[in-house]
Image: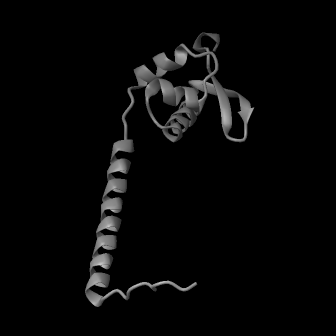
Amino acid sequence: MGGAGKKPVGAEAKRQLREQEEARKEKGKKEKGEERQKGAILVDEKQLLNALSSMKAITAHAVARSVGVKVSVANLMLKRLEAQGIVRRFGGYSGHYVYQLVDNRAK
């Protein structure tokens, strides 16, 4: 039943709150930029092929786990390897594909 209302905030307090919010937003932008920088990982192709040779069914999640990259990066690597003819897609659906190494001796 009606209590003490909120005290009005003075102009000085409003200005301080705005400055704090702007500082938080700037800090967030800097951190996001650093994350993008960290995401650029170079993977040795020999290391990738060694990891793939030990797998029966090659998926983006398995490659990401074994090589230590994000799933999106692993998916791009698999697409690139497919274009080069090193792996071929033989199963999966809706973007979750299963790959296998192409036997170069059969060619």
Which residue does the image show at 60% across and 25% down from the upper left? 87
Q: Is residue 45 left or right of residue 15?
A: right
Left or right: residue 9 compared with residue 48? left
Rendering quarter of residue 14: bottom left
Q: Nearer the viewer, residue 20 or 34?
A: 20
Residue shown at the point (61%, 19%) measured from the top left: 102
Instruction: From the top left corner, tell me how far across and down residue 8 is, in percent.
Output: 37, 88
Front residue of 72/34: it is: 34
Q: Quadrant of residue 106?
A: top right
Colour option used: one colour
Tell me the quadrant of the picture where the C terminus can be found. top right
Residue 57 location in percent, x, y? 64, 20
Q: Looking at the picture, does residue 101 appear above or below residue 20?
A: above
x, y percentage for residue 28? 35, 60
Residues 89 and 5: in front is: 5
In the image, taking residue 45 as reference, residue 98 lies left or right, namely right
Image mark count: 0
> Residue sitting at 25 percent across and 86 percent down?
12
Q: In this view, does 72 lie to the left or right of 92?
A: left
| x and y percentages locating residue 32 in the rendered image | 37, 55
In the image, residue 17 above or below residue 39: below
Outermost residue toward the top?
A: 105
Residue 21 location, quadrant: bottom left
> Considering depth in this image, is 67 or 28 the residue closer to the camera?
28
Q: Which quarter of the image is occupied by the N terminus?
A: bottom right
Please name the residue shown 41% across and 20% down the image.
46
* Residue farthest front in this picture: 1
